[in-house]
Image: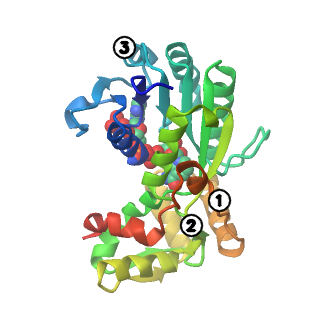
Amino acid sequence: MAQQDVILVTGATGNVGRQVVHQLLAEGRAVRALVRNPDTAGLPDAAEVFQGDFTSPETLRPAVAGVDAAFLVWPSLPLADAPAVVDVLAEGTGRIVYLSSAGVEEDKEDQGDPINQFHAGLERLIEKSGAEWTFLRSTSFAASLLEWADQVREGVVREAFGEATRTLVHEADLAAVAVRALTEDAYVGRKLMLSGTAPISQIEQVRIIGEVLGRPVRFEEIPLDTLREQMRAEGWTDPDIDGMFAAYATMATMDQPVWNTVEEVTGRPARTFRQWVADHAQDFR
Ligand SMILES: NC(=O)c1ccc[n+]([C@@H]2O[C@H](COP(=O)([O-])OP(=O)(O)OC[C@H]3O[C@@H](n4cnc5c(N)ncnc54)[C@H](OP(=O)(O)O)[C@@H]3O)[C@@H](O)[C@H]2O)c1
């Protein structure tokens, strides 16, 4: 892919897409960013911002026209909305790099949870689209812990499954891999398994956050019934809550995967969880 080629980034205001925009610009690439609201996007001036919404696929056409590769982030939208979006992207660009999940299981019709179900569905649509593709199958994002920010400020994080471990990945590492897949041919047709450097329990995550911030923050285990009530209030259904509980129970007892893919693709080791906290210290203060 040539330096002057144009790359479209969807999810450009999100955890990973925003990093992809910055890292592509730092390499001197021509970047288009798809956002729903250009006024609040807060993206660098060097990015060409296009307004578009996946729920109205026709709005994507101006952004996609003449693009060489696209980074696709699928938000929490029904899978039924995806075929038209993938069609528009595949018509307009030769390559789609899709942010997927490490939980997707090959050739399984029923993935067992709604998130992996839509990722598997998106992967299938993209494979059939005729575009070149790369799937970034990621473990949990460290950025998901930003939802603890208020509790960290209070000094107590109340959660269940304190012993549950995850190999949390830094969004900057996901973006660095995305940049290589968008701009080099070596990753076409690859399903890249991506993780952080080590499995860390929730109790340890909280301890490290406190250490890096330089003040005490403790983990407090809450009963599952309390968590269920909180999740119901947030709109979760009971089957999805049960699925989430089962997943966390597994994380407390089974080794979580660590892959070296970030280093293999980018030439530098994945950032540690401690580094992620340091990079987000302001978000927790
Ligand atoms: N969190 C994890 O642990 C984890 C792990 C593996 C995979 N993933 C996957 O990663 C993806 C989320 O990535 P992220 O965390 O970088 O994103 P994010 O921070 O959740 O941001 C979502 C992005 O999607 C955009 N968006 C929302 N609705 C849209 C619509 N109707 N049309 C077009 N764009 C829309 C938002 O843009 P605006 O609101 O600005 O328009 C925003 O840029 C999901 O598919 C998730 O399943 C997450």
* C-alpha separation, residue under disc 3 versus residue under disc 2: 39 Å
* C-alpha separation, residue under disc 1 versus residue under disc 3: 38 Å
**78 sits left or right of 218 in the view:** right
Q: Which of the two labelled residues, at mark 3 and mark 2, occupies the earlier sequence position? A: 3
| Amino acid beneath label 2 | Thr
> What residue sits right under mark 1 in the picture?
259
Quarter that holds the C terminus: bottom left
Q: Are marks 3 and 2 in contact (CB under 8 Å)?
A: no
- Taking the spot 42% from the left edge, 23% from the top edge, the residue there is 5
Which numbered circle lies on residue 47?
A: none
Q: Considering the numbered disc 1 on the image, is that residue within a helix, a strand or a loop?
A: loop
**259 sits left or right of 32 in the view:** right
| Amino acid beneath label 1 | Trp
- Taking the spot 28% from the left edge, 27% from the top edge, the residue there is 49
* Name of the residue lying farthest toward the right: 107
Q: Can residue 222 be seen in this view?
A: no
Q: Which of the two labelled residues, at mark 1 and mark 3, occupies the earlier sequence position? A: 3
Give coordinates of residue 197: x percent, y percent. 56, 66
| Amino acid beneath label 3 | Pro
* C-alpha separation, residue under disc 2 versus residue under disc 1: 8 Å
**200 sits left or right of 54 in the view:** right
Q: Is residue 175 visible?
A: yes
Q: Name the foreground residue: 22 vs 26.
A: 26
> What residue sits right under mark 2 in the picture?
197
Does residue 233 sit above or below 160 in this rendering? Answer: above
Does residue 125 sit above or below 175 in this rendering? Answer: above
> What residue sits right under mark 3 in the picture?
62
Q: Which of the two labelled residues, at mark 2 and mark 1, occupies the earlier sequence position? A: 2
Which circle, 1 or 3, is nearer the viewer?
A: 1
Q: Considering the numbered disc 2 on the image, is that residue within a helix, a strand or a loop?
A: loop
